[in-house]
Image (cartoon, helix red, strand yellow):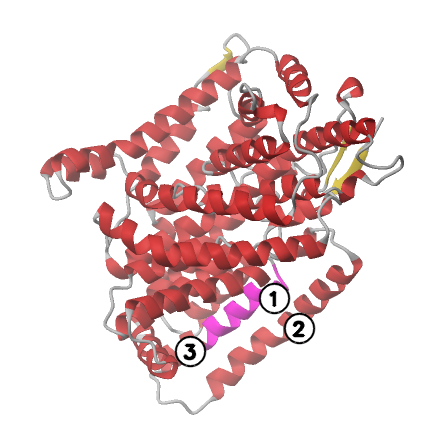
Amino acid sequence: MIEITRWAHATQREVTVSAPDEATETRTDIDGALLGGATYRSLGEQQLSPAEERFERNRRTVGLFLAPLVALIFLALPLDLPPSQQTLAGLLLGVIVLWVTEPVPIPIGGLIGVALVVMMGVAPAADVLAPFGSSTVFTFIGAFILAQAMLKHGLARRFAFRVLSLPGVGRTTPRVIIAFGAITCLLSAFVSNTATVAMLLPTALGILSVIAKLMQDRGVVRPGFDPTRLRVGAALMLMLAYGASVGGLLTPVGTPPNLIGRGLIEEATGERISFAQWMAVAAPICLGMFVILALVLLLLNKPEIRQIEGVESYVVAERAQLGPLSRAERNTLIAFGVTVTLWIVPGIVALIAGNDSAVYETVSGRLNEGIVAVFGASLLFLLPTDWRQREFTLNWSDAARIDWGTIVLFGTGIIFGSLLEDTGLAERIGNSSADALGLSSMFAVTAFAVVLAIVISETTSNTASAAVVVPIIIPIAIATGNDPFVPALAATFAASFGFMLPVSTPQNAVVYGSGVVPITTMIRSGISFDVLGAILILLLLPLMVAAVGIG
């Protein structure tokens, strides 16, 4: 028997998977990691290698002192700026340092900045806190609660085994790897990227153990080999991590950077991107990125064996254990289906009647995405699983475990975006940056936005990357005489990148913690995907925006 046992460090979840004839899974939830708490867990709460732990500890220590120092130095400079602009700029710089270095959790860094903005007289509290009433905040809440139900009742895992059981999928390693990527992409379009990866990790390790045993039986590898060093394992795990990032781009609710970027774009330009419009723009880009991802991983990590047997029987056995759909799973499907349908309806009406029609204005106003999200989430508390016991699909203790930190971070990000515009600092930053960087064309501004977002997302969270980069790019685009819509949207998409290092995204940390992916393999595969994905966004995004007719 070949056994693979590793800690999925970023989710504090132990996973032991044996060969299918002795299939066992031992899972230890520390604090509900899969059910929302680990979705955007700070790096300080992840268990990394000793060298990475030293780097993270030093990074946080430096940030603790650097953030106030940077803010104070900037406030003391004799600059030709109105007091409100200089104060806001100094505080924002301090907050950005907190976001990048994470001496405190990222949402807390934003709250510190918001409190100081009011205390130092930049704007009244009522004006500063108004963005927390944005409908996007309620979109976050509703989407997170729906995802919580999918994870709690195992609906997402059932979907994964359903796809893997399709005829022919389990016969070759490339098909298994590509199918696993497709599963991850589709799930992460609606469920947190990290939760998707952590949930599918035991299944991936189980499949890897089957492949490893088969290779040993065939004499492809020597007895006593280390199954965690197989190229096929690295390809499977990286497909799991990177596929989640790709799939998260597909919908506005797929990953927090999408909603943050979209909210900032609407705040700055007044242009609202509907759910259907977002998917129309993102779908071809996601498809192109997925094709590139499959080619990169299979070429750089060519599987040692192609034809496989045993995976199909393993999947059949796992599906049998799941049994028929439970009442809770059916209820979750109903709530999810109602929500997605109502999200898409305004886009369909726009295609038929036009964006300027009275019908569209009525429908889009009443089916606001935030309202639809909380309505769909509310159904989970109304659809019973046991009416006699008055038990329902979800209870409040489940809902309370969603990622409230991301919701707070979104609100603080929008607050600083609004203040940049209201104080006139955004225009000044844009003019100064455009002159200093020599940016003029739309392509140059967009390229700068993509590169900056990717570089920042490699060293800090994708959510923080969107919150930092999009407010910078919008005034730069305006200052160069370009519409900021495409550059800001490109920065939003690129903020979900970060494929090189375990610390770049929580899902990278999850698969790295499995012990199956060497750091050199992650860097080599990640940098290749970063570059090719950036080129794809630069070439395809402007075309899709024009084709859909937004911006």
* Residue 352 seen in this snapshot: yes
In front here: 243 or 130? 243
CA gap, disc 2 to disc 1? 8 Å
Seen at 27% across and 74% down, the residue is: 480
In front here: 137 or 480? 480
In front here: 93 or 397? 93
CA gap, disc 2 to disc 3? 22 Å
Q: Which residues are magenta?
A: 90-104
Q: Secondary structure at mark 2?
A: helix
Residue 379 placed where, x, y %?
A: 41, 24
- Decide if residue 443 is on the left or right side of residue 13: left
Amino acid carrying label 2: it is Val
Q: Which mark is residue 101?
A: 1
Seen at 50% across and 59% down, the residue is: 531
Q: Quadrant of the C terminus?
A: bottom left
Residue beneath disc 3: 87
Residue beneath disc 2: 62
